[in-house]
Image (cartoon, rainbow, N blue to C red):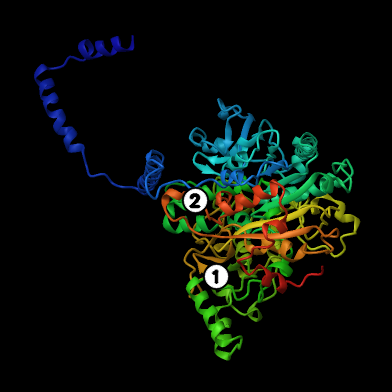
Amino acid sequence: MASILRFRKLCILVPVNPISAVEQVSEKPQVKKNKRQPKQWRCIDKYCWMIGYICTTWWLILFSFNCLTANLPGLKVPEPPGARLRREGLTALHPVVLVPGIVTGGLELWEGKPCSEGLFRKRLWGGNFAEILKRPLCLLEHLSLDNETGLDPPGIRVRAVAGLVAADYFAPGYFVWANLIENLAKIGYEGKNMFMAAYDWRLSFQNTEIRDQTLSRLKSQIELMYLTNGRKKVVVVPHSMGVIYFLHFLKWVEAPPPMGGGGGPDWCNKHVKAIMNIGPAFLGVPKAVGSLLSAESKDVAFLRAMAPGLFSSKTLGLQTLEHAMRVGRTWDSVISLLPKGGETIWGNLDWSPEEGHVCDSLKKRQLQASASDDKGNNNDSRRAFHVKELTKYGRIVSFGKNASELPSSQFSPLVFKVASVDHGSSTNSAGVSCGKVWTEYNEMSHDSIRRVAENKAYTAETVMDLLRLVAPKLMQRAEAQFSHGIAENLDDPKYNHYKYWSNPLETKLPNAPDMEIYCLYGAGLPTERSYVYKLTPPDRCKSIPFQIDGSADGSNSCLKGGVYFGDGDESVPVLSGGFMCAKGWRGRTRFNPSGIATYIREYHHKAPRSLLEGRGLESGSHVAIMGNVAFIEDVLRVAAGASGAGLGGDKVYSDIMRMSERIDIRL
């Protein structure tokens, strides 16, 4: 009908002169030709083309790798460690439980808002993001938790994916647990003796039990695997934040109900052979501070410097980081990753355990050669050189490069004025709207923000006060679930509360003298340790008033792009990953009263020799270590019955032992 009406309008209602029509037809190509102008490239076009080139190149490499025959010289795939160990006679013995960390576990939708139509039981996180990214704001809404309760918002249910597929791959082609699972299978593991203890990593640890009974399910699963596998104890392999999640479980399973699982004091010794902690964040990570303060890390700071419009363009108005902060500040689990132990562990304005760390590998070799030439004689010139190179890592947040280097005598006492927070206001001091995305920064005036920067530098203790000032609602909710101090008296009844159970400095290990604990982590990679910040331009009204100063570089090679780097696995410093195994739990201490044996197994990072190696067979990176051949072999040997002594004891490449000696803590 519509086409008939248009035809009538053309032929009857609006008569057309045939000659003029012919002229119009003949002129049409000319008009079209005149309209073709040189394309004006916008920033968004450049970003899209750049992303397209990167993705195309990556997929071409993957396609070439999968099409090339493995028999070509130099391209033969190395034999998997599982196949080699099986040939040597290793077989499955102890059941294995895998515990994923933060972010890497899949989440799926069970109930949602109208915008999520068609996504029932599809992954909102971890997997193929193509469908989800068509509606990004809907995705963010469903990944957020309730700001008051830390649980599900009304009308939304997002749950952890179950089974080994929950965290085998984070995205197509990006493995997490897949390599380890495959190699375990080669020596005889399958569903009956291998289990992925998936949980909703957004929740506080105790809330996973309150909402999903995850801890109870884990207890039952370990008991079942113990009984159905000939009463063989379980080997638990947690990763990253999963390490402190399982530490929480160790106390929960012993504690009486209703707060605990009622397993009693001998449950762990009866059911658990070993805990093999991968990339353990026992004492937290400094990058959690950057995440909560400005939704940034070194990668975000680098991208901001390379493409400022991606995050803060006035034209595009993406407010990418504001949205990330809005969602991330509803995840209570992030609070569990803040640095624990305060200045005793992480250092103060003048001192840190990593004192003397040299980031430049060439300089490091020169110093080692100089030390051997001097035969231990520290002359004045070398001492002066060392003093010049010292990095003040204890200043986790500094406002300005100078503040990160100044002597502490030039600092004024910190002033925290809660009254400076202008609750209830969503505008700046000029009365201009501060953006559409709500963050707690919207409730602070410019004067309040300026006072934060005037304090210049914050340590592991004072940064907690800073977060309480800029994010009071988040910290009030989350600090009811977690604690970050050092216990004076572990026999104090207050430490029976679950808020202390994931902090190794405020809880005792279980009474399990037959159990073993391993700290397995990468070393030799630059890892975020502290940050240089700046205020955003005062003429722009921003929801996030602070950002890492990407222009802050120094003659000291440890400072690049506003980030001071130490040693670690790119995410977790060796201090956090290794201290408890090196000192805090070594032997019989007040944190380890039954004398559980502890071992450090470090994997020094070696970059892949070619693109065909993927993420590397000797990688020490926080996630790629899961493909490290030496790491896989260690896990398989322990699962097949080996002990820490059988593996050769400690294997240390970093300065973790020296760092641990410098930390003055009562054991």
Q: Amino acid at mark 1?
A: Gly
- Report whether residue 333 is seen: no
Figure quadrant of the N terminus: top left
Q: Residue furthest front?
A: 88
Q: Earlier along the polypeptide chain: callout 2 or callout 1? A: 1
* Residue 535 pos. (x, y %): 54, 63
Q: Is residue 286 above or below residue 236?
A: below
Above or below for 12 versus 334:
above
Residue at image position (48%, 63%) is 550
Residue that numbered label 2 is attached to:
615
Q: Is residue 122 left or right of residue 43?
A: right
The residue located at (57%, 28%) in the rendering is 119
Query: Cα distance, mark 2 to mark 1?
Result: 35 Å
As rendered, which of 333 and 649 lies closer to the eye? 649
SS at mark 2 in the image? loop
Pick the residue in front: 333 or 253.
253
- Residue 400 numbered tag: 1
Q: Residues within 10 Å of mark 2 (few under 14, many from 20)?
A: many
- Outermost residue to the bottom: 380
Foreground pick, 504 / 607: 607
Query: Residue 105: which quarter of the image?
Result: top right
Position in image of residue 428 (x %, y %): 58, 55
Q: Residue at coordinates 57% horizontally, 50% vertically from top-left? A: 623
